[in-house]
């Protein structure tokens, strides 16, 4: 398990309010929490549990209020897009294929992680078709 007390405090907006998510972002956050959070157990937070069950505050809130969610789940490769949307990072980009927001250290990135493999497969197949067509033209010209 992680030592949450070692994480930096939750970022706040310039007006000192917490960053908020819209309904779509909250659904994505809940999917991340249920799938990846090691402290999540049937709607309860094991980290906050001191003898009685405590509902996971991040799963019921539209604000980013959990340090573990902010500094671990949003930094995971599955949470990068949500982090970019909620915190409006400088590197916020939109995938040319699906339109989903994502962050990338490279200025050349055009596709999110999910679409990148599809596009690479398609481009590789196109390239192979082109090479086969060129080789057939050369073979036909030799006769």
Image: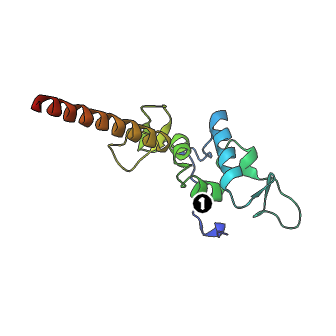
Q: Assign a secondary structure to mark 1.
A: loop
- In the current view of this chain or complex, which residue is farthest to the left? 142
**Residue 110 against residue 34 in the figure, above or below:** above
- Give coordinates of residue 38: x percent, y percent: 70, 61
- Give coordinates of residue 115: x percent, y percent: 47, 39
63 or 42: nearer the viewer = 42
Q: Quadrant of residue 61?
A: top right
Split into 4 quadrants, where in the image is the C terminus? top left
Q: Quadrant of residue 15?
A: top right
Q: Around disc 1, counting alpha carbons within 10 Å, would you say few (fewer than 14), some (14 to 19), or many (20 or more)?
A: few
- Give coordinates of residue 79: x percent, y percent: 56, 49
- In the current view of this chain or complex, which residue is farthest to the front? 143
The answer to whether 46 appears left or right of 140 in the picture is right
- Give coordinates of residue 22: x percent, y percent: 64, 35
| Residue under numbered circle 1 | 9
Residue at image x 60%, y 55%? 73
Residue at image x 67%, y 34%? 23
**Residue 79 against residue 2 in the figure, above or below:** above
Is residue 22 in view?
no
**Residue 1 against residue 91 in the figure, above or below:** below
Q: Quadrant of residue 109?
A: top left
Is residue 77 in view?
yes
110 or 65: nearer the viewer = 110
Number of marks present in the image shown: 1
Residue at image x 62%, y 38%? 25
Residue at image x 47%, y 45%? 113
């Amino acid at each position: 398990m992680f030592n949450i007390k070692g994480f930096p405090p939750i970022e706040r907006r310039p007006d000192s309010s917490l960053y908020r998510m819209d309904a779509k972002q909250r659904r994505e956050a809940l999917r991340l929490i249920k799938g990846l959070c090691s402290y999540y157990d049937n709607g309860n937070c094991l980290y906050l549990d001191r003898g009685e069950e405590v509902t996971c505050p991040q799963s019921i809130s539209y604000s980013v209020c959990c340090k573990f969610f902010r500094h671990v789940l949003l930094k995971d490769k599955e949470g990068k897009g949500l982090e970019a949307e909620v915190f409006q990072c400088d590197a916020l980009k939109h995938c040319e294929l699906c339109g989903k927001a994502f962050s990338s250290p490279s200025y050349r990135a055009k596709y999110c992680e999910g679409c990148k493999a599809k596009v690479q497969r398609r481009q590789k197949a196109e390239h192979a078709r082109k090479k086969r067509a060129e080789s057939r033209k050369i073979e036909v010209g030799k006769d």
